[in-house]
Amino acid sequence: MIRDRLGEPHESPLWEPYTGKEREVFAQWSFLHELKVHSVDYPEKYRVLSSYYDQIISCKLTPDQQILVIDFGVMVILDPADRPYSFYCRRTFYEEQMRQHEDSTHWLLSAMEKKGPIVTARDFIIENREDKCMRITYEGIESLYINEMLDIKMGLEPDMRNQAAGSWRSS
């Protein structure tokens, strides 16, 4: 594959002869291909996340091939292949965890097993709750809130959660 030879388009010096647009288009294509292969058991992941192909900076599998790391700049999506959910992480939190755990994503696996409540996309939209790492579930009613949460987090849509809650209370 091209990426195996040249590396990541926004990281490898081998991409320097190519224009920024060519790098961007390859990163998008690579993301869609990697996501499709990775999410074969959970097609809803592909349906939801593929709509953000034009926001992608990079996408790569962890060395154990179990977690797809999707970099959107301000945020990172960590997607375990064998689960019907992913994790949204603030970029700063993700980088801090990777430094602390010597570039291993095993900290994510322990987060998956965390006892107690984990903030979800539904919690983010309906209850206005937020955390540095939130679960995105692609099954059931939870899936209804994913796009709205990601749109807000990527700055594609304004965050109207507080305004909406205030208008309901004053009615």
Image: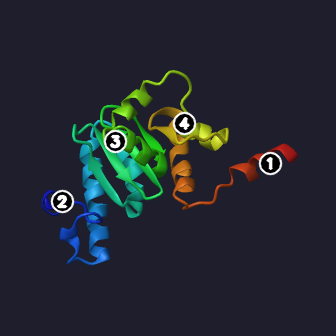
Question: Percent position (x, y) of residue 16?
Answer: 22, 75
**What numbered label is drawn on residue 120?**
4
Disc nearer the start of the sequence (3/4): 3
Name the element at disc 1. helix
Classify 10 Å Cα crowding around label 3: few (below 14), some (14-19), many (20 and above).
Answer: some
Q: Residue 56, located in which quarter of the rendered image?
A: bottom left
Q: Amino acid at mark 3?
A: Pro
Q: Nearer the viewer, mark 1 or mark 3?
A: 1
Classify 10 Å Cα crowding around label 4: few (below 14), some (14-19), many (20 and above).
Answer: many
Disc nearer the start of the sequence (1/4): 4
Disc nearer the start of the sequence (1/3): 3
Q: Residue 124, located in which quarter of the rendered image?
A: top right
Question: Percent position (x, y) of residue 40?
Answer: 27, 40
How many labels were placed on the picture? 4
Name the element at disc 4. loop
Q: Nearer the viewer, mark 4 or mark 2?
A: 2
Q: Is residue 69 visible?
A: yes
Residue that mark 3 sits on:
43
* Distance Cα–Cα, label 1 vs label 3: 37 Å
Q: Amino acid at mark 2?
A: Arg
User: Is residue 27 shown above or below 128?
Assistant: below
Residue that mark 2 sits on:
3
Residue that mark 1 sits on:
166
Classify 10 Å Cα crowding around label 2: few (below 14), some (14-19), many (20 and above).
Answer: few
Q: Nearer the viewer, mark 2 or mark 3?
A: 2
Question: Percent position (x, y) of residue 113?
Answer: 42, 24
Q: Residue at x 20, y 60 (%)?
A: 7
Q: Nearer the viewer, residue 67 or 91?
A: 91
Q: Is residue 171 visible?
A: no
